[in-house]
Image (tube, rainbow, N blue to C red):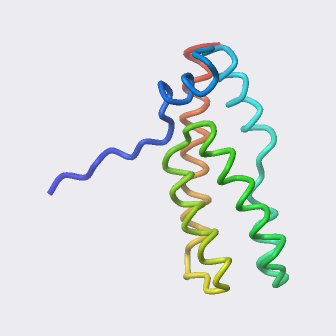
């Protein structure tokens, strides 16, 4: 069985979301890169502050959805559900961090190509 390709950035969909303005989309991806930090989520979870962790995850989920960062959106959505239920699965945050790191690499590729 062949692995399906993971879609980190759905560029065409993302550009459509900003009225077909590729330059604006690339600018928003650049802003995402500099503004989003997953470290706060881990810190909140370690402190037992599930409410703040959920708020942070929810924000990232929304931004990922709006920017069509498909894989990150899916993983963060799953993490948010686990945090809501206070039933964090082992490695769940690590999985999100790995997808986030790969998403940043893909963002760099898009920025290099379109900037």
Depth check: give the residue in front, 72 or 59: 59
Depth check: give the residue in front, 42 or 77: 77
Q: Name the quadrant of the C terminus.
A: top right
Q: Count every numbered label the image shows and give the total.
A: 0
Question: Residue 33: where, in percent of width, then height?
Answer: 72, 38
Residue at 51% across / 56% down in the picture?
74
Residue at 54% across / 35% down in the picture?
106
Residue at 62% across / 45% down in the picture?
64
Give the vertical position of 23 relative to 80 (above or below). Answer: above
Give the vertical position of 44 relative to 105 (above or below). Answer: below
Quadrant of residue 1 within the rendered picture:
bottom left
Is 1 displayed left or right of 105 in the figure? left
Quadrant of residue 17 within the rendered picture:
top right
Residue at 61% across / 86% down in the picture?
87
Question: Residue 15: where, in percent of width, then height?
Answer: 56, 23
Question: Residue 14: where, in percent of width, then height?
Answer: 56, 29
Question: Residue 59: where, in percent of width, then height?
Answer: 75, 54
Quadrant of residue 112 within the rendered picture:
top right
Give the vertical position of 5 relative to 81 (above or below). Answer: above
Is 26 displayed left or right of 6 in the figure? right
């Amino acid at each position: 069985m062949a692995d399906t390709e993971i879609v980190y950035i759905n560029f065409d969909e993302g550009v459509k979301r900003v009225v077909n303005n590729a330059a604006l989309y690339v600018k928003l991806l650049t802003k995402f890169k500099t503004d989003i930090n997953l470290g706060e989520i881990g810190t909140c979870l370690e402190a037992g502050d599930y409410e703040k962790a959920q708020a942070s995850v929810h924000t990232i989920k929304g931004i990922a959805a709006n920017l069509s960062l498909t894989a990150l959106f899916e993983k963060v959505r799953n993490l948010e559900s686990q945090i809501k239920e206070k039933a964090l699965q082992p490695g769940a945050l690590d999985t999100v961090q790995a997808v986030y790191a790969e998403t940043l690499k893909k963002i760099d590729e898009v920025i290099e190509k379109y900037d």
